[in-house]
Amino acid sequence: MSEIPPDPSAALNGEAHHRVLTAQLTSRWPEHRVGPSLARIGALCELLGDPQHTMPVIQITGTNGKGSTAIMIDALLRSVGLRTGRFSSPHLTDVRERISIDGAPISVERFDEVWEDIAPYVAMVDEQKLDGIPMTFFEVITGMAYAAFADAPVDVAVVEVGMGGRWDATSVADASVAVFTPISYDHMHILGDTLTEIATEKAGIIKDGSHVVTAGQELEVATVLLRRATETGSLVCAEGVDFGLIDRTPALGGQVIAVNAGSGPVRDLHLPLYGEHMAHNAALAISAVETFLGMKALTPEVIQDGFDQVVAPGRMEVVRTSPTIVLDSAHNPHGAAAVARTVQEAFTFSPLIGVFAAMRDKDVRQVLETLEPVMHQIVVTTVASTTRALTPEELGELAREIFGGDRVRVAPTMADALEQATLIADTLMAEGVDPQLLAGEDAVPPTPGILVTGTVIGIGEARGILVPGERAAGESRTAARAATTDVAAQLEIGTTGWGAEGED
């Protein structure tokens, strides 16, 4: 008997249903408009049976690097055989990216099921209008994540803070490990104007008796974190004292790093991510996982296995060639500096053409000033999904003050901006490039490149245009890597099931 072919209309109906549900979710109070309270998410979780308490939580906050650090922590935990849930924000192309299980976004069907399961309880909390407002989008998606993780179930949840920490919806859970990436200036209109104020908000993820793992911080920030750790009786593991990056060398597809980990120096680790900041994030991730496992050292094999599973869309990601197009966000000055350093180290673009969009509540001038020395020309645009973005005209006026009028183009949409940038790169190659733009002392032939940067929302919009076949960012690459993973060998790497051979 022949099999009945699948009904294509069912898939279409499922996609349409998912779009409707996503529209309902995203029509709620957006995440940039925060309601600083845990009352609503707490009420929802109580109705759901407190799913956030059914698994240990590793919570991550900071100004930049939260997402990539979470991805690496997730991968390392899977390399020791644990089932993981990861909650991240914002998403690039599909809201499902925010909720991952075993390193992959949950399916359309599962996402819709989770929402439909909790929707009646969300409505109950909405009716209460706690603190005067219904549940926000971020609160609802956080509740969905904890519910999905509890139902899976997962062995551990890796949770990225949306903003701040003290009243962020993710903090409805009591994290056993609180991880801090570098803290700098961002969201000052909400978190405060000084590093002390910003760090105080972020230090709120440190709960009684937890463990703190922190990247290197400014003295002002470190003081706040140490004070909070003392108040809560939390143990601190700090970069530069307890762990750290020893050395790094750029390599094909990323870099080779050496780190000081729980068992001492671990060398010759290939990290499939570019930039010094990513190497530091990798050291932080290793320390976070070792801390979570009870200070058990990970073997070099386990660490490398974890790094081999890392997929980080939108982080120096090459999505096209001829000319090469790279995606990486730079939505604050600290992030822009990392992007500027990394694109020069990882690529030999000459010239480099930028495509840039930004939110109006960011320090756009300083971001552009940081990027200007590495860009030959820049095409500024906007994003279609939010009114928070600067218009192309507003951004063009600011960019001309920094780059000069002859180096700035203005495009009405992201698609137009990508087209203009590609045309510039092709034209420069055809007409010949100023010798001063040639890279290196050997006068190698110029290789133009395009860097799409600025707001994460813009990166997502560009990625949707350039990688149209991938519904959720990284989904196909994650599946491909999972298909080639030797699970049996993976579980044999740490003979205790937790890490270093023979430790208990």
Image (cartoon, helix red, strand yellow):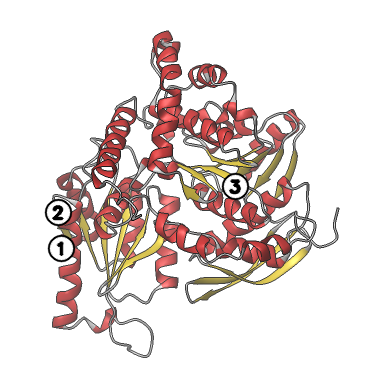
Judge by depth and name the residue closer to the eye, 283 or 231.
Answer: 283
Judge by depth and name the residue closer to the eye, 287 or 490.
Answer: 490
What residue is disc 1 on?
A: 420
Residue at image x 16%, y 50%? 413
State the CA–CA distance, disc 2 to disc 1: 8 Å
Tell me if label 3 and label 2 are in contact, CB under 8 Å. no
- The percent coordinates of residue 54 (x first, y second) are 65, 31
Q: What element carries label 3?
A: loop
The circle drawn on residue 218 is 3
Q: Which of marks 1 and 3 is nearer the N terminus?
A: 3
Judge by depth and name the residue closer to the eye, 477 or 1.
Answer: 1
Please name the amino acid that badge 1 sits on: Gln
- The percent coordinates of residue 145 (x first, y second) are 50, 34
Camera-side mark, 1 or 3: 1
Please name the amino acid that badge 3 sits on: Glu
The image quadrant that residue 462 belongs to is: bottom left
State the CA–CA distance, disc 3 to disc 2: 39 Å
Q: Is mark 2 on a helix, strand or loop?
A: loop
- Position of the N terminus by quadrant: bottom left
The circle drawn on residue 411 is 2
